[in-house]
Image (tube, rainbow, N blue to C red):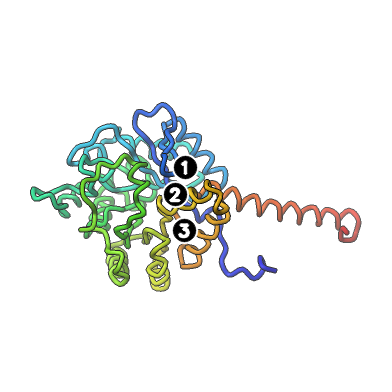
Amino acid sequence: MRRLVAETRLHPAELVLPMFIREGATEAIDITSMPGVQQHSLDSFRRALNQAAEVGVGGVNLFGVPTTKDAQGSGATDPDGILNVAIRVAKEEVGDALVVQSDLCLDEFTDHGHCGVLAADGSVDNDATLRRYREMAVVQAESGAELVCMSGMMDGQIAAARDALDIAGHTGTALLAYAAKYASAFYGPFREAVDSSLVGDRRTYQIDAANGRQGLREVEQDIAEGADIVMVKPAMSYLDVLAETAATSPVPVWAYQISGEYAMITAAALNGWIDRDAAAMEALVGIKRAGADAILTYFAVDIARKLNDEAGLRTSGSTADVAGIASTGKAPE
């Protein structure tokens, strides 16, 4: 009865797995603040991609971890840079099974750790950054990315990337806008995951946690610039922004259950305080209930597997009952 009247349902295809690929790694490296999540070597990356495809997640969102960085984030536009190599690997391995998504931001590639190019006074130069983003979008599309994910929160980034992609002939490459991305204390584990070199903080270009209406304005601007999907990040503390966005957006609305959210649930479970999978499922259903059409989550494979197992049990039970009726003419006792 509870299943029959449920208002919200979660499906593996609505989950997207973020993945980290480390340049030069010979094996997977555990991320200490995110137990169960790893920086992948190319070999372990291939195995993990196939696991994700097998359980039916909707996509993978790729982040590169380079060995060298500079002020311009040169590795981001190098066709042989780790992120662009990873995109090609993912496209070859699972491109027919799920959507290959690429993170478009400079923070993993800059020695100062910011999402853009810095001006002489140390501030982020928005226009200079957009020129780098244009180059990145084209290189990622040429590497095989089907969905380019603009996470830098620069003004005009969607319009700049769309224009660059169209000029280069990649009119079919879609853009996801990290439209309402808030300056959050819950990003900490992610910075370990990408070996962040951040100096200072990103409060000059990420949204203040106090401002809900500002998030909605950012969403409207990105849609006007041509975003195919808009996203609210983080999910947990911004469900109100997510719900209001979902109520008005003409394009799909996604959310990101970020590293700190994953780390809290996992750490509490490791201490025996909560049931990991049950808490993760409840959190994801809450994000879906608030209006997310899809969710980026580090729980994607485990939760997809659990959903498949539950569906399989119901299906196998139903099959057995039907077989019983067919062979005996009456329902089994």
Residue plotted at (23% across, 55% down):
160
- Disc 2 is placed on an element classified as helix
Locate residue 234: give its quadrant: bottom left
Q: Specify the amino acid type for callout 2.
A: Ala
Please provide percent x and percent y for residue 34.
Answer: 43, 44
Locate residue 178: give its quadrant: bottom left
Q: How many other residues sit within 10 Å of disc 2, few (<14), some (14-19) or many (≥20)? A: many
Locate the N terminus and report the quarter of the image it occupies.
bottom right
Query: What is the C-alpha distance between the residues marked 3 and 1?
Result: 23 Å
Query: What is the C-alpha distance between the residues marked 2 and 3?
Result: 20 Å
Query: Where is mark 1, residue-wise?
Result: 35
Question: In terms of sequence position, does the residue under pointer 2 or pointer 3 come before the other?
Answer: 2
Residue plotted at (35% across, 28% down):
24
Residue 249 appears in the picture as rendered: no
Q: Specify the amino acid type for callout 1.
A: Pro
Q: How many other residues sit within 10 Å of disc 3, few (<14), some (14-19) or many (≥20)? A: many
Residue plotted at (45% across, 35% down):
45
Residue plotted at (58% across, 55% down):
278
Please provide percent x and percent y for residue 159.
Answer: 25, 58
Question: In terms of sequence position, does the residue under pointer 3 or pointer 1 come before the other?
Answer: 1
Query: What is the C-alpha distance between the residues marked 1 and 2?
Result: 7 Å
- Which numbered disc, 2 or 3, marks the residue closer to the eye? 2
Query: Where is mark 2, residue-wise?
Result: 263
Query: Where is mark 3, residue-wise?
Result: 294
- For this rendering, which residue is in front, 174 or 65? 65
Q: Specify the amino acid type for callout 3.
A: Ala
User: Is residue 48 toward the left or the right of residue 150 in the image?
Assistant: right
Q: Where 90 sits versus 219, above or below?
A: above
Q: Are marks 1 and 2 in contact (CB under 8 Å)?
A: yes
- Disc 1 is placed on an element classified as loop
Locate the C terminus and report the quarter of the image it occupies.
bottom right
